[in-house]
Image: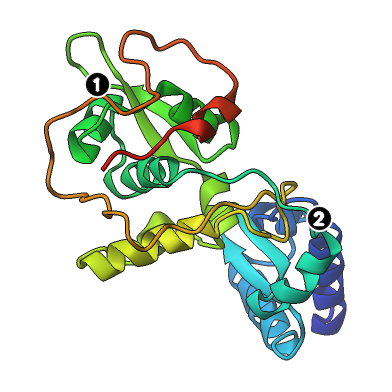
Amino acid sequence: MNTSLAKRVLETALICAQQPMPLRDMGQLFEGTLSTDTLKSLLEELQQEWAQRGVELVCVASGWRFQSRPEMREYLDRLHPEKPPRYTRATLETLAIIAYRQPVTRGDMEDIRGVTVNSLIIKQLEDRGWVEVVGHREAPGRPALYATTRQFLDDLGLASIDQLPLMETPQGQDGVLDMLSELSADPPQSASTEQVAPASGDATVVALVAPATPQTEEGASTTTDSAGPASSAMTEEQQG
């Protein structure tokens, strides 16, 4: 098969795919006749060919996909002007802790945030497909260990967790929360168009390196882990 036809096949498959396509699946298009290196080379050529268009070819955690460029969001959002539900700052901070300290237990999150984490927040993040239980710590009660998912990276447009921005300064921490606040604004290959609220500039950014004494967060239950509707976590008010 010549290069031109191979690229057309890849391009067509990627455009028609509902989810990011891994190299393994691409190889099946050619019945294993193309090596992984050849596929990567063809993908790089496709990236260059689409460089001046409103859609780009990117590699994310689950594979390769076409997606709209960030500068196109302003126009695409006009197709869906309604305002979807927003995430609280507490939810964004909890997500940031899991992303940067994974795997972590709920107790770890409470030590870092300094407040009791509402179990509905974690349930909300699980329902969204951004976090999951990856094991249990060998400690009394064997608490669950939480980590982010491939879906979380896909929605951020990242190939690995190592690509998350650094949080060495307060400005960096604010930047991460701002990034997470835009997480689901309009991921091209995501079925959800849910948007999240921008982090407020005057609130204290969660310190990911300085554990504090847990306090009860307003609206959070300290006596039960029973899960309710995920939307209930959106009513949680931020302390301090």
Q: Is residue 38 above or below residue 188?
A: below
- In the picture, the quarter occupied by the N terminus is bottom right
Q: Nearer the viewer, residue 28 or 78?
A: 78
Residue under numbered circle 2: 17
- In the picture, the quarter occupied by the C terminus is top left
Q: Residues within 10 Å of mark 1 (few under 14, many from 20)?
A: few
Q: Nearer the viewer, residue 91 or 134?
A: 91
Residue found 71% across the figure and 72% down from its top: 73
Residue found 40% across the figure and 58% down from its top: 177
Residue under numbered circle 1: 137
Q: Measuring from the top left, give residue 35's x and y in whole percent.
A: 64, 66
Q: Secondary structure at mark 2?
A: loop
Left or right: residue 198 versus residue 82 is left
Q: Nearer the viewer, mark 1 or mark 2?
A: 1
Type of amino acid at the residue the image marks with label 1 = Arg
Residue closest to the far bottom: 52
Distance in Å between CA atoms under marks 1 and 2: 38 Å
Q: Is residue 234 above or below residue 36?
A: above
